[in-house]
Image (spheres, rainbow, N blue to C red):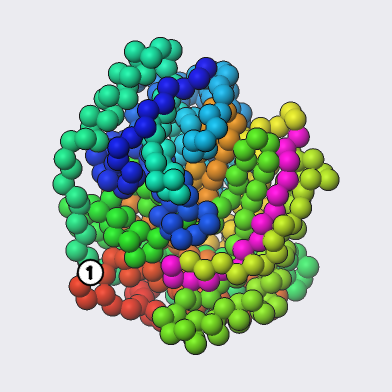
Amino acid sequence: MKPFIRELRIKNPLDAFAALEHLPYSLLLDSADLEHPNGRYSFIVSHPIETIESKDGRICLTNWGEQKHFEDEDVFKLIDARLKHWIPETETIRGLPPFQGGAAGYFSYDLGRDLEDLPEDAEKDPDVPDLAIGIYDQVLAFDHKKNQAWIITHAPSYHEARKKQDYILGLIDEPATEPVFSGLDMRWRSNFSKDKYEDRVSEVIDYIKAGDVFQVNLSQRFDAVLPPDFDAFAHYRHLRSMNPAPFAGFMNCGNIKISSASPERFLRTRGGRVETKPIKGTRPKDKNPLINHKNVIALKTSPKDRAENTMIVDLLRNDLSKVCLAHSIQVTELCAVESFASVHHLVSTVRGTLKKNKGPMDLLKACFPGGSITGAPKIRAMEIIDEMEPMRRGPYCGAMGYVGFDGSMDTNILIRTLVFKKGSVSLQAGGGIVVKSDPEKEYQETLDKAEAMFRSFDPVKHPRRRLGNPVSVTG
């Protein structure tokens, strides 16, 4: 089935999404950092024809108000089956952005429990789904390089497609009041004290010295209370203006909202070609050119950071080998420095070619959750994470993105991510612990990574820097 295509007058995805953001299962996949090589395409979807949510292995499929429930079902295979059910065959339209309709949403870190037998030590959040996916037969797609945008619709006839397009465009064309975020006096609370986090880092190092594991990603979680009238999308607009990211996004799941300024691609595939870009190694970005240059050199030459990155590259090569042709897997870039709005990262690029009988959901399942936010070996690292971290991670360190009807896929790692629910907001930040890690520096690295997110809530006219002691802590 060929989709029906119509070029749009509106070229700014943020303005278009403002008319849709209040709708449950509206989603903006936002290339907010147009200076970054990966910041080319943005996508908007709303009004899914079907939704799929999962929690602790129980799946709920909702279609036109009717629900079906599944237990002990492979949710990755189910999503693949539903994509083929709705649009069994479709062509990729060349010259248009790569997402032209399909599944979109988030896969939480805890979905990994569906794949591996993990301990039950960490406290879980009953209100946050492990997976929230919509199946969308219509997408607004933006190509920032060409400064063009289109609405792409799958429908049985031109008349039906035009009707769907007119409805969405009618909503977008209505003048929307631009939400304004003026700032809040936030009191963030961590689930670790500084001493407790450093003790946990030392415990991980002991596991490494004992030969139990090579690397573990350890994070801390920050929570804050929000006023009743808080507007999460207004905050997102402010966040992206001060901390643009190539894989940013905003999703309204109804009871929860997710706002992300992620710099990290997880998995992309198109035409059978696969790419993953793990991040390991961080230094803060500084306005002083001399200090900034010093930070870049320190990152580039750090044996500890290069060791972290190289370990994760090896892990991802192993994960890709489950679904890719063995000879096709190549590391095309190792430990390259990439600069973002507030930090510098070491980024590697690993590519491969899918086996003929494998598709995007096979790829996602084989690599989930990402090695850069678990550790090596992955399963043992995840067991230690569950032992060390007081609460399950939820969306943090999971993935957000799309899987197209045509077999294309692009997902990010959900870091630099806020989860809003019931008058509160949570944020997590972590880092990879290796044998040469310094506990105090590892604690500070989590603050460096969270700093831009903390500052995004500060009063706009009088921002306060919070590095060093950003939170009142418990633990």
Give the farthest residue toward the bottom. 290
Which quadrant of the rendered structure holds the C terminus? bottom left
Nearer to me, 254 or 383? 254
Residue wearing tag 1: 460
Which residue: 30% across, 37% down?
9
Q: Decide if residue 145 is on the left or right side of residue 161.
A: right
x, y percentage for residue 275? 65, 48
Say which amino acid is labelled 1.
Answer: Val
* Magenta span contains residue 159: no
Q: Which residues are magenta?
A: 341-355
Nearer to me, 99 or 279? 99
Q: Check the image and report above or below for 72 versus 211.
A: above
Q: Check the image and report above or below for 275 versus 131.
A: below
Residue 421 seen in this snapshot: no
Q: Check the image and report above or below for 221 versus 83.
A: below
x, y percentage for residue 144? 42, 48
Magenta stretch, main secondary structure class: strand
Nearer to me, 430 or 10? 10
